[in-house]
Amino acid sequence: MRDHWQKANATILWSRRKLRRALQQVVPAHLGHKWYPNRSLDLSDRASHACAILTDGEYAVFAKYSDASEGLEQFEIEAASLRLLSRRAGVRTPRVLGVVPVAWGGVLVLEAVDAVAPGPRHWREVGRTLARIHRVEGERFGLGRPSYLGRLYQDNTPLDSWPCFFAERRLLPALRLAIDSGNVPRETVRQVERLIGRLPALCGPDVAPVLVHGDAQRNNFIPSAAGVVVIDPALYYGHPEMDLASIDCFRRVPDDVFDAYREMLPIDPGFWERRDLWRVWGYLTAASAEGGDHLERLARAVRKYL
């Protein structure tokens, strides 16, 4: 542990006065006594924001900082989404200690999760956790507020049709981002445009809108001694297969996840054929940002449905 932890006053970002002040606004109020972190673990290389775990040796918090103009809004939405997941779906989420405005952005402070190595029990709980989220029903596809996938703004203005929502609120904005990035070849752009035109025939049976995590990658389900903890939601009411396709989009998960999910909710047999269709959106956003291997994944997925 000593190799990974740094003295807090040696961590340039989190030793800044405005960020120390933000932490001191919320952590002592929660604990009921003073709190002076003396160690920090910087996790910024694993996230889209500057973030770290800070501790005084007894109590640890996870803090995110954004200096973006919309940073405070992002964190307020994330905090509200975590509370909604806990309240409506009954799943574990980190305790929100506060969202603090600072110059040019904001700080989100959460109670840190003491992660453990995942085992079969935890993988099964990931499946059950997804099913609990998907049991929360909505009236229309979308949500009354936007969401953020990392720093990426997502328009959740409600629509009555899932193919329309997937096209207009997810694929078309991602395609514009891809074009602007210059990372995606023109031929692939044209193929995605053709795929969007075919969505009504590709999306499968009609579904009722249900709450979805919105970024249900395996890393956003943290195993702990108490059970699986859900982080980084990008909530909206959508198609449950979006989350099922995301859970192993970039890294495989054991079949236990899907087996446990089926114990609570059915998975349509056609999902396995549609899985790459739902992943096109994720591949587009990843290819726009990074190019590389994501381009080939995107091209293969799109060709499958043309």
Image (cartoon, grey):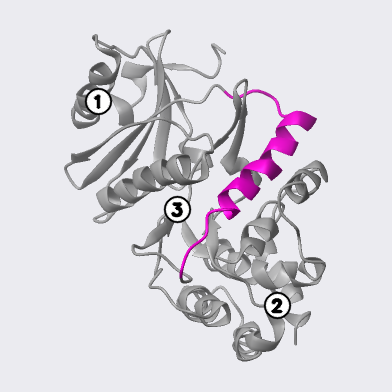
Q: Which mark is residue 205?
A: 2
Tell me where residue 210 appears, x and y as whole percent: 55, 61
Residue positioned 41% across, 35% down in the render: 51
Give residue 273's mark.
none
Q: Residue at x 51, y 26 (%)?
A: 113
Q: Which residue is mark 3?
A: 150
What percent of the width, then of the height, locates residue 263?
Answer: 77, 46
- Given residues 104 and 215, the one toward you in this image is 215
State the count of labels: 3
Few, some or many residues within 10 Å of mark 1 (<14, 14–19, 20+) = some
Residue picked out by circle 1: 26
Return the x and y of residue 7 as percentages of the image width and height.
39, 14
Q: Callout 2: helix, strand or loop? A: loop
Residue toward you, 19 or 127: 127
SS at badge 1: helix
**Of labels 1 and 3, the one closer to you:** 1
Tell me, yes or no, if residue 119 can be seen here.
no
The residue nearer to you, when weighing 259 against 247, is 259
Q: Main secondary structure of the magenta part?
A: helix
Q: CA distance from mark 2 to mark 1?
A: 47 Å
For the point 24% across and 30% down, which residue is it? 19
**Residue 131 belongs to magenta span:** yes
- The C terminus lies in quadrant: bottom right
